[in-house]
Amino acid sequence: MNGLLSFIAQVVRLKSAMGRLQRYEFKFFVGLIISFLLIYLSFEVIFKNELIRERAPTRTGSSHSSSDTPRSPQITLLLRMPGKVMEHRARYYCDLFRSTVLFWPPSFGKTVIVLDEESQADHEFGEIVINHTRKHFPEYRLEVNYEALPKDKRVLEFPGAPRSPGYNRQLWSSFFFDLYTNDPIIAWMDSDVAFITPVTKSSIFSGTKLRVLGWDCTFHFPWVKQWAITSERALGLPFVADYMSYFPVYIYRDTFLHCREHIMKHWNVSDFEQAFRLFYNDRNMLSPVSVVLSYAWFFERDRYDWNMKLCSSLTEYNKRFPAGASVGPEHLADILSQPQTTFHVPYGEFLSANILISYCLSHEVAGNRLAVCEKHNFSLSDNFYLLHHDLQRVKEIQPNTCAGNNTDYCLQVLDCHYKEVGLEIKQNGRELLWSNVDVVEKLGNEVGLTCKPLLY
């Protein structure tokens, strides 16, 4: 503005000095002055707009489009547990913590633990795990959050409830995981799960889409039938598949919010506590992960890469779905294209042996000869279990999914997996140190826990 005033003053002075000019000369000069003035004002506007753009804060937020996924998005490894329960403390140290520092690269993102707000023991446990991580594993970022009880006690305890109030609290919490991180992706961990092989980007993403695993081969179990009833009640839409066998479950953070909003709209309420009590209120059990992923199937299908196995006819299976929501052949896979990276320890403790197998196969590809591995003679075929859809029942249902004509395909999948890990080790993009496992076991001893040894 000061520049413009100065410019006008110069024009006035020029005009007074032009008294002797002819009229046509004056008109020409005034036109020239006006032209320069317009050019000046144009540059003034452009310059100010540039300043505004430079000073404006960067906008952040999630997008429904999977094409907007950044190349290396941060992923929150998230666990909900009661910190006061010794069994869950043991699971944390012996299953999750011990296997995380071996197979989950810290570059992927932080770990978040959600504990009970009102429990002093939970706060004490939270301080312990934070101090242990900061002191011994500073490269890993750990956050502990505390969740308050629902305002309505009937959310957790009601007549005929199929689960205890403590278990129901974890079910309730599962719908709010987006509140505990700003990262765009959540890796949802169950409380009894351990990593069994190195997690890679290929095991998380298919292109820009998050991999989803599911199947219908457990539909004859009473509790899965109950999950289907409760899921359909919550969403007003059919249960898609059993997604409880697979962890981490990778879900976009905003999918949780969108799912809650849909459920409240379906039940015509403005409070999720009201909605929760309306769809979870009898003897039928609840699987939150199946609810959230069923929602994603109907409303955000293009954001995810679906890999499901059916034990029934696809034509019969699709009869349950409304138009436009059918499962197609492109969504099915009899054998996984990436190995499962975790297992439920209580249901498949024999699979703990595969932790050492995966560790040794990774270092073998990286060209590292380790004394602990030279005691054994491991091969890719020792990890065929990891390509099965359901590790919880791997001994009872198709124990060797890679038999016969499938063997070569399984070997190729595992070979690609370990080559990816081995290359990262050689390029210093990943550390795979058994000494980390030893440290966690000692930390567990400090808090009165004894982990079963993984070496044999």
Image (spheres, rainbow, N blue to C red):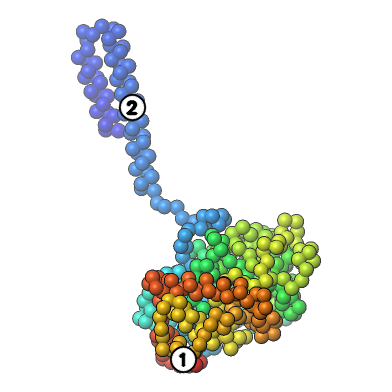
Q: Position of residue 140 (x, y in %)?
A: 41, 75
Task: Tell us which disc is closer to us: 2 or 1.
Answer: 1
Please tell me whether mark 1 sits on a helix, a strand or a loop: loop
Q: In this view, does 370 lie to the left or right of 236?
A: left
Q: Where is residue 366 in the image (x, y as percent from the top left)?
A: 42, 76
| Rendered residue at 25%/21% (across/down) | 11
Amino acid found under the numbered disc labelled 2: Ile
Residue type highlighted by circle 1: Lys
The image quadrant where one finds the N terminus is top left
- At a point 49% along the width and 93% down the height, the residue shown is 456
**Residue under circle 2?**
39
> How far is disc 2 from disc 1 in space, using C-alphas?
81 Å
Q: Does the rendering let one see residue 120?
A: no
* Residue 194 versus residue 44 in the image, above or below: below
Q: In which quarter of the image is residue 431?
A: bottom left
**At x 52% / y 71%, what residue is drawn?**
416
Which residue: 42% across, 71% down?
Answer: 424
Q: In this view, does 420 lie above or below 450?
A: above
Q: Are discs 2 and 1 less than 8 Å apart at CB?
A: no
- Dot 1, how many residues are within 10 Å of its Cα: few (below 14), some (14-19), or many (20+)? few
Q: Could you say which is closer to the camera, residue 365 or residue 52?
A: 365
Task: Locate residue 346, reporting x and y percent.
Answer: 60, 87
Q: Is residue 151 left or right of residue 133?
A: right
Residue at mark 1: 375
